[in-house]
Amino acid sequence: MLTIDNLVKSFESDKRTRKQAKAAKVAGDDAVAGPARVFAVNDVSFDVKEGELFTLLGPSGCGKTTTLRSIAGLEKPDSGRITVGERLMFDMQGKNRGVNMPANQRGLGMVFQSYAIWPHMSVFDNVAFPLQVRKRNERPGKPEIADRVGKVLEVMELGHLSDRQATKLSGGQQQRLALARALVTQPPLLLLDEPLSNLDAKLRESLRFELKRLQRELGITSIYVTHDQVEALALSSQIAVMREGQVVQLGKPRDIYENPNSRFVAEFIGTSNFLNGTVVQQDGSTVTVDTVEGRLRVSSSAAVPVGSDAIVSIRPEAVEVTRSSAGGTLANEWTGEVVTRAFLGDSVDHVIRVGTTEVRNRSNPNVSVEPGTTVYLRMDPDKLALVPVG
Amino acid sequence: MTTATPTAPVAAPTPRTTQQSPSSLTRARRWLFAPKTLIIVAVAGVIGYLALVPLYYLLYGTFFDAAGFTLSGFTRAYSANGIGRLISNSLVFALGSAALSLLVGTCLAYLNVRTDVPFKPLFFAASMIPLIIPGILYTVAWIFLASPDIGLLNKLIEPVFGPGLLDVFTLWGMIWVEGLHLSPIVFLLMVAAFRSMDPSLEESALMSGASRWTTFRKITMPLVRPAIVASVLVMTVRSLESFEVPALLGLQNGTYVFTSRIYFVLRTYPPDLASAGALATGLLVVAVLGVILSNRVGKGSKSYQTVGGKGFRPHPMELGRWRPAAGALIVGYFLMTVVAPLAVLLYTSLLKFYTAPSVAAFQSMSLDNYRELAGLSKVGTALKNSLFLGVASATLVMLFMSIAAWIVVRSKSRARVVVDQLAFVPLVIPGLVLGLALSFVYLRSPVPIYGTIFILLIAYCTRYMPYGMRYAITSMHQISGELEESAQVCGASWWQTFRRVLLPLLSPGLVAGFVYILVVSFRELSSSILLYSPGKEVLSILIFEQFENGQFTVLAALGVVMVLTLVVLVTLAYKLGAKVGLKQD
């Protein structure tokens, strides 16, 4: 549906870095020379299938918004190729060199972070605008516009607010209005730029499910940009985790959570305990790692050479805390002492000292251990992940 | 036990109330004579005096003569020959200048904020023009450029269009000069408006399929309409109040507007004060209406600002192949408003007598005019007077306004609304009207102030009170009330708190305001022209006199010196954080 090939977008770096770069160049000191251009998006490629909700996830400045804006046509990439369905939107490589369709001819729907609701128009006028500005021969008649706007407002549960001044709406209603405006032309692709980040936590959660339901029901292919990992995990069919202008991992939410391919991804998506170690043995799908605090068995399908360095990522909920030992019959059983405990309502967190390392645990509220108690930690090999070093 | 308990609390307060009445009396007395109260009352009194007394005397002098109430001044003023012409000239001049400045200023602001137009630093330089080239010098420069006999531009285009095509001594010439001089102010107002607009409002229109032009028409323009309407009103009022341009360009061939007519009536012998007062009253009423209207519009526009709380990331629009054209436009504007007037002043200042550029002219160039300036005792006096007035008025205004700002921002006194309003009253009084009103006051005053430099000081303090107030209030808002409260908790009195905690914290803002007032006071002409007396000239008056005497070359030299002085002062103000860019009145 949407194909992005080798997208690159760079910006002139600010004056100071530019001066430094020049000075370093003059001095012949290449090591200090900062880049004259900063790469916001550096060789990004991905494919989005029909009906998918594809999320670009990453910290601020990772290039996710620039990628989205390039798809929208609001930003002109340096090179690369963007196609939506059969239509070529942008191409600065291959034989079609020099195609750059303007944003207003791409026919995509977009919801902005600020919603960009036009304050001088009513709810109806905001939604009708994309239909009204079509070319004369493609423009539907007034009754049809009213009909289509009415329908989409009904779907968004805004029908009764049609005549209201757009600025008089609440945050959640503005968000749905922005969505209605983006969907009224039935675009092949919907672009969402952090649409939930301006809302408070409660509303954000309910709208997250609402958004997912709507996207499923309408079956509309969507690109979703966010820095919120919970949002990404809850909504997406596919997630592309971005860092410094590049996609570092691409996959289904569960894969990315359970098998992060780098420490960055593991840390960015949820919290994790990391233990450095050396691979001592690989036996089918089980890898044995000697860490600073003891031996761990980790399920891994990837082939890892014996003797190489590795990091074991342990999610807090993968650590089971018990008072009694299984007596050495189980692999991955460690002894430690509870340092602190925090009751969080739906869970209890413990921090347990094992040797010189502090391990975070997340347990059921009915498992609660006094600080100072000696406990046994059990870690299921299937729930541990091996993360390559670097 | 249980039945007795409810009665106890009821009985307790009764003895206390009898004790309270004497203590509250002494408290009232103590409050009345506390230094805090005295200072506040004094400051409020001075502000009220400066703002209201001139207005009262202006109306009194206009409507009352020795015999009592009379409308004869009004009858004389408004039945004079050509009054219809006067009113229509004033309107055409004011609206024309406003329209020109709006067109130029808005286009520049849009290009600067929302596109990737080249030469962006030039905008900044151009926006400083109203500050560093006083209106009188700007007008004189344009006389050198576009007068029908001696104008440089006329000489330049003569081979093609014949002699004297451009004539600055017409209503259109006046509109051109005033409009260009005001355009940087519109530019700054509109830059603020475009900056406060979320760019994604335009982007979402593009995403909806609207063309650039439709987006501009249906989204951009409606959203900045409040700022446009406000700019039109403010610029119209300012052009109505403008004195330099109509006086220099219109007086000699009888193209009068309100301000130049008032000046003319006062200069003919015997001066008809009541008739001038009647004209001034008319001008004042129009100015007040304009300001009220623009405040209305300002309030109405707030409802648009509720959308989008986050900071906007600027995504300038790429102009593509239009970029060189837009760049040429910017350079053209810069040449026209900055380079040409300054260059012609410099050129003239080096000549013996004004002549079009030629080899002979360049060979005759010398610094004689500057030498002559240095030898003129009048110049030294004027410079001294200007400096004294600038420093004294800036000091007094900032000192009083810092206390006034405290009253408005911090005190819970009911007087604070009144103080706030009074401090801004002078903003609506045209300079010439203030000058006239003050002469009404101090011609009658038993204290000999008229004819001394102190009447100019009073005029300057009154005119610049609103600017000082704006600076002081802004910085007062930036200081948390807790800082003051903690000083009080530590045992400091109000005056100690003000002096040791507030003033030091306010000082950056106050210094910025000080320099700003110093800068604007240097160019003051319209009030001074009615109030100065021989020996008490200021720089701008000297320039006006030299213009009337036809000493163009010496005038140009003085102008160059003045511009250089202002450049230094403005740079200083800028370094001190006096947002000279956006703090335009």
Image (spheres, grey):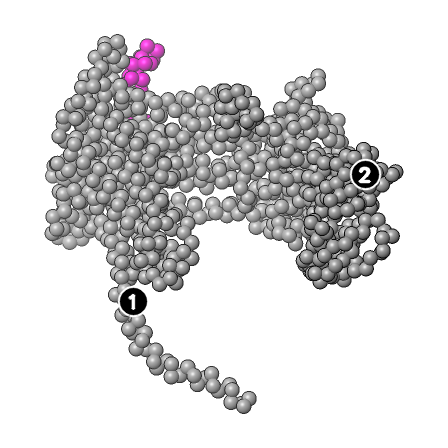
Q: For the point 32% across and 14% down, which residue is it?
A: B156
- Using the rendered view, name the quadrant where residue B157 is placed: top left
Instruction: Please tell me which residue lies in front, A287 or B344.
Output: A287
Q: For the point 17% across and 34% down, which residue is it?
A: B382
Q: Quadrant of the N terminus of chain B?
A: bottom right
- Using the rendered view, name the quadrant where residue A54 is placed: top right
Q: Is residue A103 magenta?
A: no
- The chain carrying label 2 is A
Q: Mark 1 = which residue?
A: B31
Q: Is residue A234 visible?
A: no
Percent across and percent down for residue A315 are 74, 48
Direction from residue B515 to residue A388 in the image, left or right = right
Residue A280's disc number: 2
Residue B57 drawn above or below residue B179: below
Assign a secondary structure to mark 1: helix
- Using the rendered view, name the quadrant where residue A94 is placed: top right
Q: For the point 32% across and 74% down, which residue is it?
A: B24
Q: Amino acid at mark 1?
A: Trp
Which residues lie in the magenta part? B151-172
Percent across and percent down for residue B249 are 25, 28
